[in-house]
Amino acid sequence: MRTYLFLTLNIVLLLGSSLRVEGQKNPLESMFPNAKRILVGELPVSVVPLREEVVKAGVSGEIVLHNPAGKYAVKAGQDLGGIDLEKFRVQEKLLEIEEALLVELKKPQEALLRASEKTQLEEKLAKLNAEIAILEKFMADPQIYSKLNLGKDELNRTPEESMAVTQAELNKTKEMLSEMLELHRTDRLEKLKVSEIDLKFKSQKLQFEDRKREVFLSAPFAGEVEVLYPYFSDRSNFVSAGTELFRITDKSMVFADLPVLDSDWRLLPKDSIHLEVNSAKGPVRGRYHSRTQVSWQGQSKLCYRFSFKGEDSEALEPMFGGSVPGRLFCELEEERRMVPKFFLITFNPELFREGGWPALIDRMMPGYLLDRVGLNHLALKQKPKQE
C-alpha cells in the first residue's frame, strides 16, 4: 500500500507540473473514466416481499390439504384444504334446515301465539269487568252487604274501606290488561317478535360464517404457497389451533429498505437514485418507491424503500428476511469524469483543508467543475468554453 501511494505521489507531482502549461491537454483525463452514475452510499439493506403471511389453524381437528407438499402458485381466495370438513358440512345442513323451519314453522307459530294471547287477554278483561261491576253494585247500595252482617277484616278495615281498596286494585289490573290488549291488537308486537327471531338467526349465521373461515383454508392473496405442516397422505392428520400450516408470499414486487443515515441523501432527486443489490442472477437495480420508518439497530429510522419487479424480484427470494449489502447510486444528467477522492487529497492535503474539493479540482483539473460528491469519487463536469 505504501509503495502504491509513493508511486501515486510521484505521478501526481510529475503531472502537476504539466498542468501549468497554458493550452496543454490535461494528461489526467485519460486516467479517469467517464460514467453516468455515481456511488453515493453503501449500507446493509433489508429485503422483504410485497406481502407475506403465515396461515395458522383456526380450530383443532382433522386437516385435509389438497396439495400437501412443496411450493406452488395460488390465486387469491383459492381453496387450500380444510379442518373437520365432514363435521362442518353436517352443521351446515342443520343450519339450512333451521332456516327452512324458521320460514315455514316458527314465524307462523309466532303469529298464532300472538292471536292466542290476544284472546286470553280479552277473556281476562271481560271477567275483570264483570267483577268490577258487581263490586260497584255492592258499593252503590249499602243495604245489600249490611244484610250480610260483614264485620271488620283482618286489617281492621270496615266493609266500605275494604271494598274501596279492592276496587282500586281491580282498576289498576284492568288498566294493565287494557294496555297489553291494545299492543296485541296492533301488529307492532308481532313485528318485534319476528324481528327478534330473525336477528337471533342472523347472529347464529354470522357465528357460523366465522367458523367457516376457520374451517376452510384459503389463500388471502395471490402468490406462492409453501406448506409448513408435516402432512402425511397415507393417514389422518390432526392439528391444534394455532399450528402454522402455510407461508404465502407475494413476490410480484420486492422491497429493499435503505436507512437514510446521511442527511445529504435527502437532497438527491428521487427520480435519479436507484439501489443496487446482489441477487441469485447478479446485481439488480431497484427504483425509488417511497419513504418509511423501520427499526434499525434498535431505533426508528427513516428509510428509502426501493422496489424490484419481474425477474429481479424472483432473483431476490433467497434474500427475504435478511440484510444484504446495498449500494445507492445517483444517476447524472450526462457522463461525468470520475476522479477518486483519495487521489486529490493525496496531492495536497493542506489545500483540501483550506479550500475543500473546489480548490483541489481547480489545481489538479483546471478545466473541470464539481458536479456531484460520491462515496469514493467526485463527478466532474467540464467548464463551459469561453468565447
Image: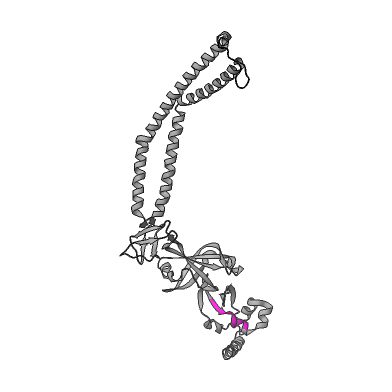
Q: How far across and how far down the image is residue 5, in percent?
A: 59, 88
Verify whether residue 360 appears in magenta. no
Location of residue 219 (image quadrant): bottom left
Location of residue 252 (image quadrant): bottom left
Q: How far across and how far down the image is residue 206, in percent?
A: 43, 46
Q: Is residue 387 visible?
A: no
* Residue located 54% across and 77% down the image: 337
Taking depth in this image into account, of 113 and 384 the one nearest to the observer is 113
* Residue at the extreme right: 354
Task: Tell me the quadrant of the picture where the C terminus can be found.
Answer: bottom right
Stretch in magenta = 337-345
Instruction: Decide if residue 362 is on the left or right side of residue 121.
Output: right
Q: How far across and how far down the image is residue 40, in percent?
A: 56, 73
* 253 relative to 342, above or below: above
Instruction: Decide if residue 162 is on the left or right side of residue 321.
Output: right
* Residue at the extreme left: 234
Total labels drawn: 0
